[in-house]
Amino acid sequence: MATDNSVVTGLSGRYARALYELADDSKQLDAVAEDLRGLLTALTESDDMRRLVNSPVLSREEQGKAMAAILDAMKASELTQRAIGLIAQQRRLFVLDDVISDYLRLLAAHRGETTAEVTSARELKSDELEKLRGTLKEIVGRDVAVETKVDPGLLGGLVVRIGSRMLDSSIRTKLERLELAMKGAG
């Protein structure tokens, strides 16, 4: 495998690395990535989906059947279905979003890309994403894969994390700084 394994660690990293290696061996890297992006979107947008993966009340079988039905409806690849089924069987669905992020990080490293985690107050449009990718490419000096999350609590602006570097231009943070400055002035 031509990927730096140090980009992922821990429990989620082990699952992501195993899935990545299986997908690489079977030439399904992009298909699995697309399946996982769809799942990540569902996790981000659906309270029911988050409850499903985080519920200690649901049994392994219930979680497994629910995830199988979701993946079947998504027309996910057999490899993705088996991998998520195993994660459900092991009662590890609570790390699913981290497994997905780690898999996408491995894929980006394989392609020579850097991964940027971007959190915005609203869903970014495709032209905004392309402009952001271009700007980040100029800053970093190589291609950038962008993982997006939505946090309405930001009010506006972006929080961009590339590796250990973070740029926070959110309105929430600016308001917090202003509040702190006003307390110091009074």
Image (cartoon, rainbow, N blue to C red):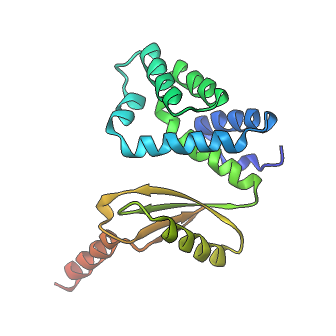
Q: Residue at x 28, y 72 (%)?
A: 176
Q: Position of residue 52 (x, y in %)?
A: 38, 28
Q: Residue furthest right?
A: 2
Q: Does 181 appear above or below 93?
A: below
Q: Toward the viewer: 8 or 156?
A: 156
User: Could you tell me which quadrant the C terminus lies in?
Assistant: bottom left
Q: Residue at x 31, y 59 (%)?
A: 152
Left or right relative to 108: residue 60: left
Q: Does 138 appear above or below 124?
A: below
Q: Residue at x 60, y 44 (%)?
A: 34
Instruction: Residue 18: name its quadrant.
Output: top right
Q: Position of residue 27 (x, y in %)?
A: 78, 38
Left or right relative to 22: residue 134: left
Q: How many marks?
A: 0
Q: Residue at x 47, y 23 (%)?
A: 69
Q: Position of residue 173 (x, y in %)?
A: 34, 71
Q: Position of residue 23 (x, y in %)?
A: 73, 36
Q: Residue furthest left?
A: 186
User: Could you tell me which quadrant the N terminus lies in?
Assistant: top right
Left or right relative to 127: residue 24: right
Q: Does 108 appear above or below 154?
A: above
